[in-house]
Amino acid sequence: MNFFGYFMIWLAVTGRTAKPHVWQMCLYICIGANSQTFSNTGALITCVKNFPESRGIVIGLLKGFVGLSGAIITQLYRAFYGDDSKSLILFIGWLPAAVSCIFLRTVRLMKAVRQETELKIFYKILYVSLSLASFLMILIILQNRLHFPRAAYVGSASFVMILFFSQLAVIIEEEFNVWKSKRQELNNPIQLKIVSELPNPPPVEDTEIEPRPTRGDQEKHEKPPVSWWSNPFKPPERGEDYNILQAIFSIDMIILFTVTTFGVGGTLTAIDNLGQIGKSLGYPSKSITTFVSLISIWNYLGKVASGFASEIFLEKYKFPRPLMLSLVLLLSCTGHLLIAFGVPNSLYLSSVIIGFCFGAQWPLIFAIISELFGLKYYSTLYTLGGGASPLGAYILNVRITGYLYDKEAKKQMAVEGTR
C-alpha cells in the first residue's frame, strides 16, 4: 500500500504518467498515508501484549520514535537525494515498504513472562533515543542557520543511523545474557537428595476418589465465547475485556473520545498553523523554520516523558493516568494562551509546550484504553481512539480556524480596497 500510493504520486509528479484526475490523486494519497496505520497498529498492539506490565513505557517509546521519524527521514533524504524534492516522494514510497518487509517476522506475539531486567533494558533504550533526539535537535538548528554541503548531510545521516541502530546492541546483549543463564542452568543442574522413607510417615486416610471429569462434562462448564457485538449495554467491570460495542457505548469511551477530539485536535491545529502564526506576529523566517522543524523533537519528548512518568507514578504513588492526561491538557492551554495574547517572543516557548503536550497525550490515551477495556479487542479500540485526531483537526482546523481566517482575510482585503 505504501509503495503503490507514493509511487503513483511520484509517477504523476515527474510526468511519467498522464496527468491524473483530482480523485485519483486523493486515492493515491489515501492508500499511501493509511498504510502507516497498519504498521503502527501491528507493532504497538504486539508490544503491549508482550509487555503488559510496562504498557505505558512501551507505548511511549514506540510513539516517541514515530515523532522522531520525520526528522530521521529528512536527514536520510538529504543524504541520498540532496534537494531534489520530487525524489522525496519516491523515497517515502520505497523506504517504509523495504523496512516492513525486512523486519516483518520480528513482530510477533510471545509468551508474556516479565524478566527481572525488563525495566533496565527499557531505560537503556530510552537513553539511546534521548541521545538521538539531542543530536537531531542540534543538527536541525545548525542546518537552518548554516549552509550544509552534500558531504556534510551524508556524514550527519550516517551518524544518525549509527545512533539509531545502537539500540540493537542493547537487545543483543540482553538476549546473550538470557541465553548464557539458560545454558548455565543446563550445565549445573540442581542436586536433589532423594529420601526413600519418611521418619514419621503420616497416617493414610481412606478418601473417596472423585471420578475424573470427561471431556463432555468440561464442555458443559465452559463458558461459550462472547461475540464482539453481544450485550452492548451491559459492560463488564472496568479492566476486564470489553467487546467492541460495549466499549463504544460506554460512558468512559465517550468521554475519552471527546477529550481526544478537542485536546489533540486543539494542539494539532496550533501546530499546523504555527508558521502562519509566526509570520503574522512578525518573527524572522529563519526563527519560524527552526521552531517548526523542532516540533518533532518536542513531540518525541512528550511521548517518552508521559509514557515513563505515568508508569512510575502509577506504580509508586497510585497516580491515575486520566488525571495525568487532564494535567497535560491544562498545560497545553498555557501554550494556546501565550499565542492568543501575543506575548512578545513567547512563540518559542509556546511551540515547545504545544509540541510536548501533543506528544504526551497519545501514550496516556492509548494506555487508558487498554486499562479500561482490556486487551482482547485492543487493536480495534486503539484505532478507534486514534480516529478522534482527524475528527478534531477537521472541526477545529478546517471548520473553525479556516472559517475565521477567511473571514479576517475578507475584512483586510476590503480595507486595502478602500485605500
Image (tube, helix red, strand yellow):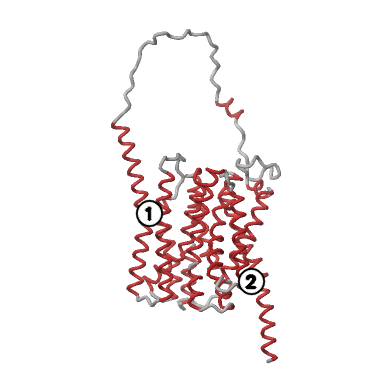
Residue 73 lies left or right of residue 324; in this view the side is: left
Front residue of 50/338: it is 338
Disc ID at residue 389: none
Label 1 CA crowd tier, 10 Å (few <14, some 14–19, many 20+):
some
Residue type at mark 1?
Gln
Residue 360: x %, y % from top left = 54, 57
Res. 221 image quadrant: top right
Res. 266 image quadrant: bottom right
Residue 298 lies left or right of residue 374; in this view the side is: left
Residue 134 lies left or right of residue 332; in this view the side is: left
Residue beneath label 2, please? 341
Residue type at mark 2?
Phe
Q: In the rendered image, which quarter contains the C terminus?
A: bottom right
Mark 2 or 1: the one toward you: 2
Judged from the image, the secondary structure of the residue bearing numbered disc 2 is loop
Judged from the image, the secondary structure of the residue bearing numbered disc 1 is helix
Real-space Cα separation, disc 2 to disc 1, in angstroms: 43 Å
Residue 73 lies left or right of residue 225; in this view the side is: left
The mark that comes first in sequence, 2 or 1, is 1
Residue 371: x %, y % from top left = 58, 45
Residue beneath label 1, please? 167
